[in-house]
Image (spheres, rainbow, N blue to C red):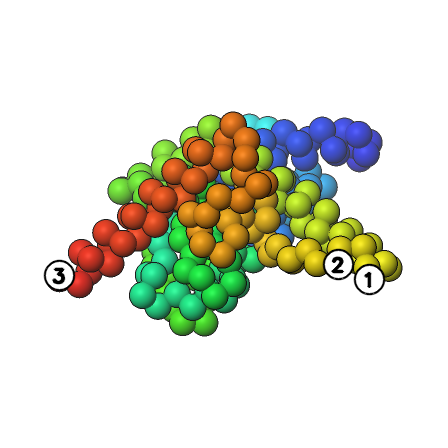
């Protein structure tokens, strides 16, 4: 039995070989949890549909296990997808924002939301939580599947955004605890939802907030504006059909 440090090291290697879509199709809450289970020998290496056959081969090389076909109980290898929100139907409920593991959806309560496609991993976790079915799925990779439809850089970006989101949620939970312990501590402060990280925009999605006054603010606002414009173009195209 490997030592705890050995298991941690193996889990880190396995996690680095996963696509970091954080889709939970493997049966675990995130890629890191699945990697830990593989390292412990409690999960097979063939439970990640986004990684596909190429991902299984990568995991087999790391673990020394035999290559196996993808376990279809967890899904099928398919082209990578992205989602977009039909602004005509979005009610601003924020449920999709809360479900998104990489903070790829921006908006605020009762205002239209939109997807920054460059950060969308195709996890599709936002789709089932939408109460008005305004989130649509489209292919982002054509016929390419698995790692042919993804890249190491994509995985690194997704992992970074996911970890930052976890840190933010932990900070918000601590803030809520402190607020409960000292009711006057945040008197007069507006509560900021799950979009409070770099993807957060107050009320008007294109408004300038003090928290965005840094070197990356203009780029983030441009990304949001571009995502909004793509959503409008899609809606206009759909109306013409």
Residue furthest to the bottom in view is: 131
The quadrant in which the C terminus is found is: bottom left
- Front in this rendered view, residue 15 or 205: 205
User: Which residue: 38% across, 69% down?
Assistant: 133
Q: How far apart are the two marked residues, 2 and 1, measured between alpha carbons?
A: 7 Å
User: Which residue: 43% across, 68% down?
Assistant: 91
- Front in this rendered view, residue 192 or 73: 192
Front disc: 3 or 2:
2
- Front in this rendered view, residue 90 or 186: 186
Residue pointed to by mark 2: 187
Give the percent coordinates (x, y) of residue 78: 36, 48
Q: Helix, strand or loop at disc 3?
A: helix
User: Which residue: 72% across, 47% down?
Assistant: 171
Give the percent coordinates (x, y) of residue 168: 66, 45
Instruction: Say which mark, if any, is on residue 91.
Output: none
Q: Helix, strand or loop at disc 1?
A: loop
**Mark 2–mark 1 CB contact (< 8 Å):** yes
Residue pointed to by mark 1: 183
For marks 3 and 2 on the same chain, the one whose residue lies earlier in the sequence: 2
Residue pointed to by mark 3: 240
Residue furthest to the right in view is: 181
Q: Helix, strand or loop at disc 2?
A: loop
Give the percent coordinates (x, y) of residue 82: 37, 49
């Amino acid at each position: 039995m490997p030592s705890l440090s050995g298991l941690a090291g193996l889990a880190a290697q396995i996690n680095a070989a996963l696509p970091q879509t954080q889709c939970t199709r493997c049966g675990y809450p995130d890629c890191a949890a699945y990697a830990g289970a593989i390292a412990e020998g409690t999960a097979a290496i063939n439970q990640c549909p986004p990684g596909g056959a190429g991902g299984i081969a990568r995991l087999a090389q790391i673990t020394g296990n035999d290559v196996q076909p993808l376990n279809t109980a967890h899904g099928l290898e398919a082209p990578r997808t992205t989602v977009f929100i039909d602004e005509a139907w979005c009610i601003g409920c924020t449920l999709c924002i809360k479900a998104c593991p990489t903070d790829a959806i921006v908006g605020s309560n009762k205002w239209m939301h939109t997807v920054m496609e460059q950060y969308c991993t195709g996890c599709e976790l936002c789709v089932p939580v939408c109460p008005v079915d305004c989130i649509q799925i489209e292919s982002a990779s054509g016929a390419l599947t698995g790692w042919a439809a993804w890249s190491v850089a994509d995985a690194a970006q997704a992992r970074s955004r996911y970890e930052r989101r976890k840190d933010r949620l932990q900070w918000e939970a601590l803030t809520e605890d402190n607020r409960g312990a000292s009711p006057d501590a945040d008197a007069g402060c507006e509560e900021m939802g799950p979009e409070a990280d770099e993807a957060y925009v107050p009320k008007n999605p294109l408004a300038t907030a003090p928290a965005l006054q840094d070197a990356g603010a203009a780029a983030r606002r441009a990304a949001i504006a571009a995502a909004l414009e793509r959503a409008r173009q899609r809606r206009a195209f759909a109306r013409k059909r």
